[in-house]
Amino acid sequence: MGVIGKLFYYKKKGNLKRLKKWEGELNKCIRCGYCYELCPLFKSQNWESDTPRGKLMLIYGMISGEIEPNQQIVEKLFQCFYCKNCSDNCSAGVPVTDILTDARADLIEAGFDVEGTIVNINEDLCSVCGVCVPVCKYDALSIEKVGKDENKIVVDKIECRGCGLCVAACPSGAISQKEGCEVTLPELHKKVTDLLKENKDMKAIVFCCNWSLFPGMQLSESPTLVKTNYGLIVSMCSGRVAPELVLNAIEEGAWGVMVAGCPPEECDHDGNYKTRRRLVLLRNMLKELNIEPERIKLDWFSTKESAKLTKSIDDFVKKLEKLGPIKKMEESKKIGG
Amino acid sequence: MKIDIEKLKKIVGEKNLSDNLADLYVYGADASVHQALPTVIVKPKTIEDVQKIVRYANQNKIPVIARGAGSGTSGHTVPIDGGIILDMKRMNHIIEINPEDMLVRVEPGVVDDDLNRALKPLGLFYPPAPASSRIATIGGEIAANASGVRSVKYGATRDYVMAMKVVLANGKLVNLGSNTRVHSSGYQLERLIVGSEGTLGIVVEATMGIRPIPKYRCLAVANFDKLEDAGNAISDIISSGAEPSMLELMDKIGIIAVNKAMDLNLPEVAAIIMFEADGNVKKAVDFEIEKMKKICEKHNGTGIEMSYDLAERTRLFSGRKKLFASLSRYKEGIICTDLADDMGVPNSKIAVTAKKIHEIAERNNVIMAVYGHCGSGVIHTKIMLDPKKKSQWKDAEKVIEELYDYVHSIGGVTSAEHGIGLSKAPPWKKARSDILPVMRSIKKALDPNNILNPHKLHDAPDDWVGATNLRYKVG
């Protein structure tokens, strides 16, 4: 049986004890690859090793001893936003994200330290105010005593889901994520800028939460780009839409900004409540600047409610067309800048 | 294997090449039982990129394996000799949609469902759609001559290929076929490429026919207490002249598996048939459905439900759509392997083949579900076994040999729509020994250095279990 020979075997680094119990489940993965379609990370990276199937293959290779974990393999395994589209839709019922969490625990125990999609704290900027700690539903952030009178924020790399809510909440801009997965503030900002530059008729920027939208992954490029008068940006959670992103969009020429999130009680991160509070404040700010507050809209959508989403966007764009472009740009620029 | 990585980087750019183990390990596998390591993965964007890479590989006799979604079930893209994996997913432009000539022009990495998403607003569709259409690329579908649930009426990929641009093993670009519905102008070379599994050339652009979406679709489901009755009903439907747009079978093993995996609560009868009719005149659709319903009833089909409503049709079909992966949930300790997965049999042999499959499986200590697009003669099975036991792989070998001997003896084919690759090569080679020299001559003429997906199809090893590493940890 040609099992041994072409690939090499190695003495395992660490004993990967948590992962071993998943061997049966990993065998149940038939590697059909249907999970690609649902993976936001694959869409941004376009490497099969970033798909749920690819990650399960790497884990299987590690526990079977065919491949030795190295920095690149581990980096792949720490890149996941835990949207669970893969697990929820796998008809072989493979609990992809549970397996991934155990992989992270085992690999950290084996001495690996990578960035992945995990948040990173810049200790020079962090004032240890603790605002971020209650923001995280997964208790991935905590305040730890490091000296007699010194504290610091610590990230639990196993629990961090990479949703970016704490990044949006941090008042000192001390929390960040690695560039390259289309979730950092500069990357999201660039998307706004590019959309507005590409299409001068663009009226609205719509931020859609990955979960509420359920990304029907369009992996191919159409011949005639249907020019819509709105631009859609998928963020990992509506709570990730920082106030500056909304204001930057308005500053750069959008007539309005809509945020689409999961309905109350349905958000995996409780980020929608934060968004609701945030957008109330932003609307009040627009009012102060004599800009119509209805130029900022918030709406809720459950998974697969794409028809409702389309209608809500259409209604919003119609409203913006009635309102016309923003007249008080000078004032808004002061805030946005 | 020595490959000039820097040279390849210059062609596709640094970020579109990888030789790190994380990528090599993943790109060395597909949905089959096989696994091997490539030397490097490159992602071309243009035809010129492909030409340069292939030219370099040919000069240096390096294997080149074109890869779409990697959803193949028989190891087609598993790099048995290492070499360059050409990940075609970056060539993903739908170049032209031409409703006047009823054709589309696409790059090979375009995903089937994406193409249909683009066509839908125009009232058009690209029919062959295999079950993997959500990720499967048009290039991959051409390589395997893929078909799907609606092929019983609309045909397979080969029926839609009109023209294509192909990069040959020497790096030269050729234009095959035409933009006309028919042509009688020499060898139908575009047809030769269909089903060639990447061994004759790299498809870099394809012109495919499209069809209007019918106004009405009606789906019906019938239950049977005997698998044989269901098989006979299918054969009768086809020979009656009825025109189903879908005619699917699912046996009890499949039903139990989807019930377990998806909580569908389907009746656990011996078999279910799903039949659909479509068209632009409702009365004509009603007529076809009624005709098929009567044949089902004649063969003791009961509990027949039918619907025109999209949501209801989706509900009725959901179990079939996700059956493949659900089979892994059939029984604890048993998993679903992609072996003996898509034989084709003549229409009159559906019932006897279905019965034979269960009999062979039972005799050899494995479980096999019987399902598939039986209206077009496609019987999908999977061998379900305990992958850790060495003896089970011996059982699987025996099943494959016995089963294909039977299928070939009744005039069937080894593969109806997934292709031969590695795991189906031994029984196929045994059955088609007469044509192997012809195929080898064609291969030699087009690829004298044997660089394009070498050691597949006619040149695949005779021992499929030992051909590569198995993806499972055995023992």
Image: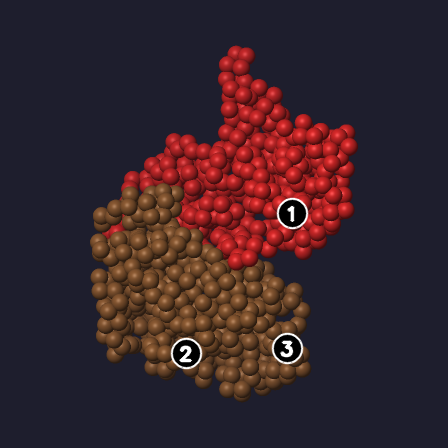
Chain colours: A red, B brown
Task: Identify which residue is drawn at 56% across, 84% down.
Answer: B242
- Using the image, determine if residue B286 lies above or below residue B337: below
Work out how far the residue at label 3 is from the one at label 2, CA to CA, in angstroms: 29 Å
- Circle number at residue B293: none
| Neighbourhood count class around disc 2 (C-alpha, 10 Å): few under 14, some 14–19, many 20 upward | few
Nearer to us of marks 3 and 1 is: 1
Q: What amino acid is labelled 1 in the image?
A: Asp
Asked whether residue A266 is in view, the answer is no
- Using the image, determine if residue B175 lies above or below residue A225: below
Residue placed under numbered mark 1 in the picture: A201
Residue placed under numbered mark 2 in the picture: B183
Residue placed under numbered mark 3 in the picture: B280
Where's residue B412, x and y in %?
38, 79
Element marked by disc 1: loop
Q: Quadrant of residue B444?
A: bottom left
Element marked by disc 3: loop
Work out how far the residue at label 1 is from the one at label 2, CA to CA, in angstroms: 46 Å
Q: What amino acid is labelled 3 in the image?
A: Asn
Work out how far the residue at label 3 is from the one at label 1, CA to CA, in angstroms: 39 Å
Where's residue B23, x and y in %?
37, 46
